[in-house]
Image (cartoon, rainbow, N blue to C red):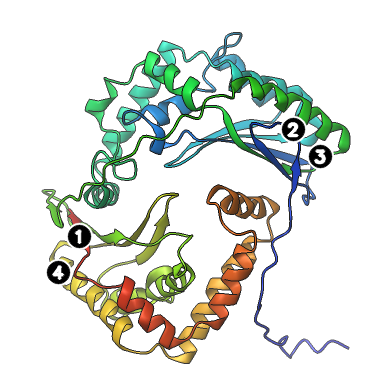
Amino acid sequence: MLDRKVAPAFSTARSLELPLSRELNISNHFKTFYFDQVRQALIKIDIIYKAGKWYEPSVGISHFSAQLIEKGTQKKDSSQIAETFDQYGAHIEIAPGYDYTTVSLYCLSNKLKDVFPLFIEILLTPSFPESELELSKNIFAQNLKINNEKNSYVASKLIRRNIFGSSHPYGSSVEEKKLVGISREEIIRFFKGHFSPYEIYLTGQIDNSSLKYISQELKQLDSATGANKVAIQPLLTIGEKEEYLEKKGSIQTSLRLGKRTINRNHKDYFDLLLLNHILGGYFGSRLMKNIREEKGLTYGINSSINTFLHDSLFVIGADVNKKNQEITIQEVRNELKSLREQKISSPELEIAKSHFLGSIQLDMANPFSVMEKIKNINLNHLDTNYYNELFNRINRLTSNDLIEISKIYLTDEDLTIVKVG
């Protein structure tokens, strides 16, 4: 009999085997991957393009090119497109990113043939109406005005600009004065030059008949190949080491402390991931315990590693009372120094490891999240055993290992600091 008064034995995962996807032989111009372990009658189709900010000839072109794809084709206007997808309970999600742009279709398995032809039409023959471009620019400008009133938004924008440079894809941002120069002609040129599929991901409950249908339809995208021009080589320019943008009437200040760091392909990346988790990656982190719980300087503070394909950014962020700016910055420096000089206790290390690895395991319960991990491996050119190696390395890490990593990557004299408010 099960004794419910006794808790189940605690066990620690020592590995993580990522389920395999199938590669479909559809085209010589793009790779297609299929993951079928989905119980719900849903389908998600991701079309990945090498059309992110890294490739744009001027700031904003990638964003507006992506956003306008679903705003009209040679046969249908935006309202007709929206009505069709609404009728069948489907929708398109477009995500212009720093390195890639993704166009995704979500639909019910039994409605696939009702919406997929329109999806292909959108990908092949977008018309980029001038009226839709102007509307999108106006909406963007209004949202930008609202966001620029938010200290946290401005601080995040400035820290990237000061670390990478205002003309670098990872440091640039679209400002209102730049919107005027974004033209329909330039968007069309960018679309023709970069919007040919790079990789395609199919996730969902798809029977053999539907899979054959999808494969046949996707072959039409071969006509969009022959593009994918070489990326523009950006110039890295370092901005101000410390910047304070004062806002009159603002009670709080948004702080950002950051610097460039290593990305996923570096041998020390797994070590730095755990170290960041201990520093400020979860609610029980050192920054939270010190600056939030003990000193009451903020409601929340965190550190993160923002990885791109070609670079990576380490950032610490918090919102504090204006008068507490400097003491907060000093306490952050103290925590960085502590990690460089003092061993992490065994209980603290084990809790951080368990939380970190448990979060990854929890994410694996969702098949769409599994496919995201498969995409992460493929798009960042990682080893197929990446997540298992991550688990193995995290489990092996010791306090001595983390001190050595801290001395290399958590130095504070090279931090860029931004204060807004």
Q: Residue at x 48, y 60 (%)?
A: 265
| Residue annotated with mark 4 | 326
Q: Amino acid at mark 1?
A: Ile
Residue 167: x %, y % from top left: 25, 38
Q: Nearer the viewer, residue 311 or 335?
A: 311
Locate residue 32: give its quadrant.
top right
Would you say 196 lies left or right of 51 here?
A: right
Q: CA distance from mark 1 to mark 2?
A: 49 Å
Q: CA distance from mark 1 to mark 3?
A: 50 Å
Dot 2 or dot 4, earlier in sequence = 2
Q: Amino acid at mark 2?
A: Ile
Dot 1 or dot 2, earlier in sequence = 2
Locate residue 297: give its quadrant.
bottom left
Q: CA distance from mark 4 to mark 3?
A: 57 Å
Residue 204: x %, y % from top left: 75, 43
| Residue annotated with mark 2 | 26
